[in-house]
């Protein structure tokens, strides 16, 4: 009888111990120092709309999130992610997402989750197109690429700008031609007669294959001739002409000896 009572007591203790409820320990926010760097350097970093780094490289102490599902007491790395915005003049704003590594822990009395955060965030910035906000460039046209075989595919080929040329004395004949450093995209042309000075007109380039990208490699040559005077030539970069919406010049003619 005594042995039976002893055995019953031991069994009861074991059952009570096995039925003991472990305590859930909720994750807590941490004050984590995070370093920020970018390529190129000198970017500002924002987190939740607040400036946390005035210029990369740099660092800041960030209060990390610790969100849990109130119903299931589970955590998700994605729901605890921190999003940092890198901002630099001349470059596109870029967001970098930092997620924690989530691991479980469990012992006889407690259980829960541990968060492991990276010590640093790096961002590679991308150049902002200088013509992105230019209202004179049709959206998307600046990035178009063409060749001899598909000329006529871009809107910049017929960019309309102001042409103005004058001379002293007046009555000089004006010729123009295209000189291209990228003949596979923009063809060189022969001289074309315009009119005599003074000349003013709003007209298009009508340069086949022209894009905003290759316009820096294209030149318009203006030649002015008049009997009894030396010929004069001026060259104008097409990129500059597009930006200024004008191509103009004045020629002081020199008499031939």
Image (cartoon, grey):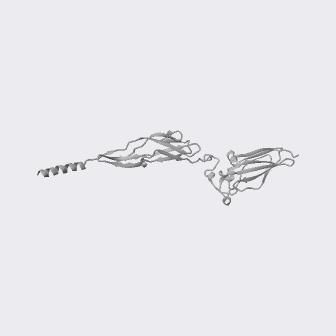
Query: Foreground residue, 173 or 185?
Result: 185
Residue 253, image x, y percentages: 83, 44
Residue that protrudes farthest toward the bottom in the picture: 149
Query: Foreground residue, 114 or 245?
Result: 114
Query: Foreground residue, 143 or 113?
Result: 113
Residue shown at 50% from the left, 41% from the top:
46
Direction from residue 137 to residue 19 in the image, left or right:
left
Residue 256, image x, y percentages: 87, 46
Residue shown at 40% from the left, 49% from the top:
102
Residue shown at 16% from the left, 51% from the top:
8
The number of callouts visible is 0
Direction from residue 212 to residue 224 in the image, left or right:
right
Residue 50, image x, y percentages: 49, 39
Residue shown at 51% from the left, 42% from the top:
45
Look at the image and tell me whether residue 24 can be seen: yes
Look at the image and tell me whether residue 72 can be seen: no
Residue 131, image x, y percentages: 62, 47
């Amino acid at each position: 009888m005594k042995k039976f009572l002893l055995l019953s007591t031991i069994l009861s203790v074991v059952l009570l111990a096995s039925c003991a409820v472990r305590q859930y320990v909720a994750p807590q926010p941490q004050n984590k120092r995070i370093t920020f760097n970018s390529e190129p350097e000198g970017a500002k970093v924002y987190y939740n709309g607040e400036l946390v780094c005035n210029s990369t490289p740099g660092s800041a102490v960030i209060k990390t999130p610790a969100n849990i599902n109130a119903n299931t007491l589970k955590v998700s790395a994605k729901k605890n992610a921190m999003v940092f915005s890198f901002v630099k003049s001349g470059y596109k704003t870029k967001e970098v997402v930092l997620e924690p590594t989530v691991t479980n822990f469990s012992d006889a009395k407690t259980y829960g989750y541990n968060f492991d955060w990276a010590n640093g965030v790096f961002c590679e910035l991308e150049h902002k197109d200088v013509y992105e906000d230019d209202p004179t460039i049709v959206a998307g046209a600046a990035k178009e690429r063409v060749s001899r075989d598909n000329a006529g595919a871009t809107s910049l080929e017929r960019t309309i700008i102001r042409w103005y040329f004058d001379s002293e004395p007046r009555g000089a004949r004006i010729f123009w031609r295209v000189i291209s450093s990228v003949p596979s995209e923009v063809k060189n042309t022969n001289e074309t007669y315009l009119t005599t000075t003074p000349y003013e007109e709003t007209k298009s380039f009508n340069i086949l294959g022209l894009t905003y990208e290759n316009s820096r490699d294209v030149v318009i040559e203006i030649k002015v001739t008049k009997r009894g005077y030396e010929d004069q030539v001026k060259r104008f970069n097409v990129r500059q002409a597009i930006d200024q919406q004008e191509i103009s010049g004045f020629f002081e003619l020199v008499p031939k000896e």
